[in-house]
Amino acid sequence: MAAPLDPGLYIVATPIGNLGDLSPRAAAILTAVDLIAVEDSRVTAKLLQHIGIKRPMLPYHDHNADKVRPGLIARMANEAIALVSDAGTPLISDPGYKLVRDARAAGHKIVTIPGPSAVIAALTLSGLPTDRFLFAGFLPPKAKARADMLAEFKTLRATLVFYETGPRLSAMLADVAEVLGNRDAAVAREITKTFEECVTGSLEDLSARYKDTPPKGEIVVIVGPAGEAAAASADDIEDALKEAMKTASPAQAAGAVARALGADRKALYARALELQGK
Ligand code: SAM
């Protein structure tokens, strides 16, 4: 029999594939709570079966959260309630922050039991800088909203992390290259599962690789920060373009400078044509 827990909210991270990644503390908390708020009770039932326990579950997901939340908050006064998502860390591209917000407002005890998250696992595999990163979740599916969001990241000196699906991967990588330049990137797939892989390359190369063969499974895309030269001044960029045009066509020169300095290829091409006409 597990020791009783203080009433409150217990945020429990669960595996992103390999059930062996459930921490002993996470298992102990799930065993001891009065209720588990779950995204999908079928998914969590498998996890509970893996550790040989049965606990009461209550669905808490995007479609019922507003309705269910007040009842959960009320119960936390006397009961220990765990929050889990289908995989990984709750609240990370998953429901939960409003539950934490309201539990805090109600003065309940809030405890986190950290563990796997695809964002962090993918970063560790990518070989891209990890000192500063921005997690952007799933990009908007519509072209305009997607381009607008990517434009916001353009001058950010940080590695970017996105979640994506296989069928949309190639187009997504091409869109990112279009707005941010052809940066170094990594596609981490099926992390901690049998077919785990991490493929690295430029955004354009990766987009081409997956164009006709969309990968299966779960995917994280990691995009390196703009190159050192992104900090290059407008004068530096102009000089580099003029230099490149001594030996290359306007299109080639614009492409090369855009890649090297993380600058906008279309703008460079327009400028190259101007320079050529002078
Ligand atoms: N809360 C989760 C976490 O902490 O990672 C993320 C939930 S989000 C709804 C699900 C997305 O995470 C998937 O579509 C995929 O992009 C990514 N993901 C989850 N598990 C993964 C895995 N094993 N390998 C690669 N990506 C994964």
Image (spheres, rainbow, N blue to C red):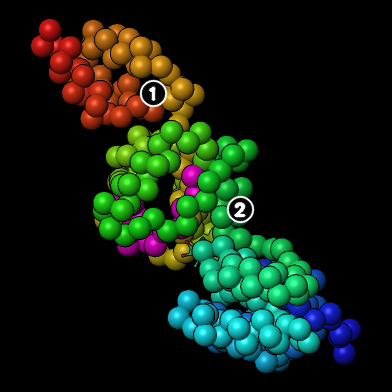
- SS label for mark 2: helix
Residue 217 image point, x, y percent: 44, 66
- Distance from label 2 to label 1 (Cα)? 28 Å
Observer-nearest of 84 and 193? 84
- SS label for mark 1: helix
Taking 77 as reference, is 242 left or right?
left
Write the residue at 21% across / 24% down: 269
Write the residue at 31% across / 47% down: 147
Write the residue at 71% across / 75% down: 106
Residue 83 in view (yes/no)? yes
Q: Residue 87 colored magenta?
A: no
Quadrant for the N terminus in the image: bottom right
Q: Residue 162 colored magenta?
A: yes
Observer-nearest of 8 and 205? 8
Residues shaded magenta: 160-172
What is the crowding at mark 1: few (fewer than 14 residues within 10 Å), some, or many (at least 20)? some
The residue at which mark 2 appears reads as 120
What residue type is disc 2 on? Ile
| Disc 2 to disc 1: CB gap under 8 Å | no
What is the crowding at mark 2: few (fewer than 14 residues within 10 Å), some, or many (at least 20)? few
Sequence order check: which comes first, mark 2 or mark 1? 2
Q: Disc 1, ligand 1: is the CB inside 8 Å? A: no
Q: Disc 2, ligand 1: is the CB inside 8 Å? A: no
The residue at which mark 1 appears reads as 260
Q: Dividing the picture into quarters, in which one does residue 36 lie?
A: bottom right
Up-down relation of residue 58 to residue 144 (above or below): below
Quadrant for the C terminus in the image: top left
